[in-house]
Image (tube, rainbow, N blue to C red):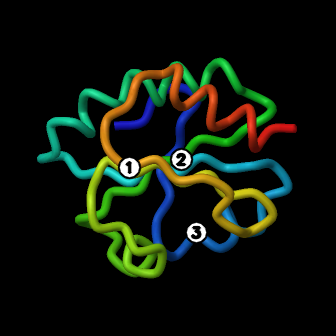
């Protein structure tokens, strides 16, 4: 479930929406059955709202899309990958507080 500032992305759209983006992109790899993913969702929504205009935030359901998570070695979810210039700039695995995500994004959004 994506919030107002978060959009869904699929394997088919990944290259265009994420890798070719002029703006850094945070991708939340998640699944509906994953408790920590559901717990992280409001945090991801808050990050998306806070960084609106500086960062795109997208969610990818790993049950419906398996090519992209496989390509980036996603073995545990939730996993947050920050892409900048078509490459992975940062990676966070597991449930983390918003402060941790903010610190990570500060390194990327310079």
* Residue identifier under label 3: 14
Categorize mark 1 by other alpha carbons within 10 Å: few (<14), some (14-19), many (20+): some
User: Which residue in the protein does label 1 denote?
Assistant: 93
Q: Residue 5 placed where, x, y %?
A: 58, 29
Q: Secondary structure at mark 2?
A: strand
- Which is nearer the eye, 85 or 90? 90
- C-alpha distance separating marks 3 and 2: 10 Å
Q: Is residue 11 left or right of residue 70?
A: right
What distance separates the C-alpha of mark 1 from that of mark 2? 16 Å
| Position of residue 103 measured from the top left corner of the image (x, y, whole percent) | 63, 29
Of callouts 1 and 2, the N-terminal one: 2
Q: CA distance from mark 1 to mark 3?
A: 20 Å
Vertical side of 66 occupied by 103: above or below: above
Q: Position of residue 41 (x, y in %)?
A: 36, 30
Q: Position of residue 26 (x, y in %)?
A: 59, 46
Q: Which residue is mark 2?
A: 58
């Amino acid at each position: 479930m994506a919030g107002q500032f978060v959009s869904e992305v699929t394997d088919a759209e990944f290259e265009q929406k994420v890798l070719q983006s002029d703006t850094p992109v945070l991708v939340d790899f998640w699944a509906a059955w994953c408790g920590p993913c559901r717990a992280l969702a409001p945090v991801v929504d808050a990050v998306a709202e806070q960084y609106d205009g500086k960062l795109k935030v997208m969610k990818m359901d790993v049950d419906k899309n398996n090519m992209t998570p496989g390509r980036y070695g996603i073995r545990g979810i939730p996993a947050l990958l920050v892409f900048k210039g078509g490459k992975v700039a940062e990676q966070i695995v597991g449930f983390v507080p918003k402060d941790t995500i903010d610190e990570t994004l500060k390194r990327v959004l310079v």
